[in-house]
Amino acid sequence: MTDTDDRPDSTVPVRPDGGRGVTAWAVLLPPGRYDAERLVHHDTLELTGLTAGGTADDPAVVTVATATATATATATGAGAGGAAGPRPGDPVAVLTEGPLRLVALGRVARATAERREDPDDPQSDPASGAFVVAYTRRVFDEPVPADGLALDGPVSALPADVYRALVARLGPSPARRSWLVSLDLPIEAATPAEAVRLFWSYVRDLGPRELPAFVSPSGDELAMQAFVLGAEANQDPEEDD
């Protein structure tokens, strides 16, 4: 697993594709995905049911699978500047609804492997590919309002100036620092090795949704805070009374 630099990416490259234009993209997270992305660090955002690709002679097609139907829209001649569909390297603004907020920046990346409708049958038909975004900056803990932005689906073309305006709302990236993160569990076992095995079993089964993790700035353990579900959680029952 690697970490991103968390640097604002405001560059919107001009495509050498016959003048189809300068384009960035807005990707809307599916319901419930915001919490999952906030809870665990991921290098990429992978969304199934959305396929991106294409060449200068074969424009990209974005296929959006909904609960009731599959709608296919070719991005050529639509969106920002008549641009073709998403291609690897294109800048992306990741947003969530209710209200509309900017939660991350990234770039379109290539899917890592072909998928099959039946994973146990390599001869089954290819499934809808994954639309992959490589994160360049995350602001899941402090989303930025994106009111006034009009989206026409899960993947929408953004004019370059609109994308840059969204990036500007983020401001400078906070300075990175060292943190101490710990997870303490009282475990009964016959041997130290068994205790370690039980520890990892509890971590696997309960995970960050139930186990509190304790974090403090390196060198300032008195500032320790407990986090559950990616948010600060009070672990002193007397303070709740």
Image: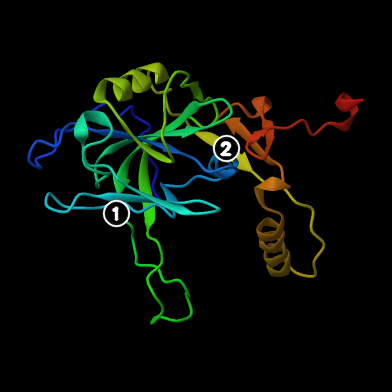
Three-letter amino acid code at the position of disc 2: Leu
Tell me where residue 91 sits by quadrant: top left
Specify the quadrant of the image occupied by residue 172.
top left
Q: Nearer the viewer, residue 150 or 70?
A: 70
The dot on residue 180 is 2
**Closest to the observer, 198 or 13:** 13
Residue at the spot x=40%, y=80% of the render?
Answer: 122
Is label 2 in a helix, a strand or a loop? strand
Residue 105 location, x and y as percent?
Answer: 38, 33
Front-lying residue, 126 or 217: 126
Q: Which residue is mark 1?
A: 110
**Which residue is depicted at the point 53% across and 25% down?**
142
In the picture shown, does residue 127 fall above or below 109? below
Left or right: residue 206 compared with residue 141? right
Q: Residues within 10 Å of mark 2 (few under 14, many from 20)?
A: few
Distance between mark 2 and mark 1 Cα atoms: 34 Å
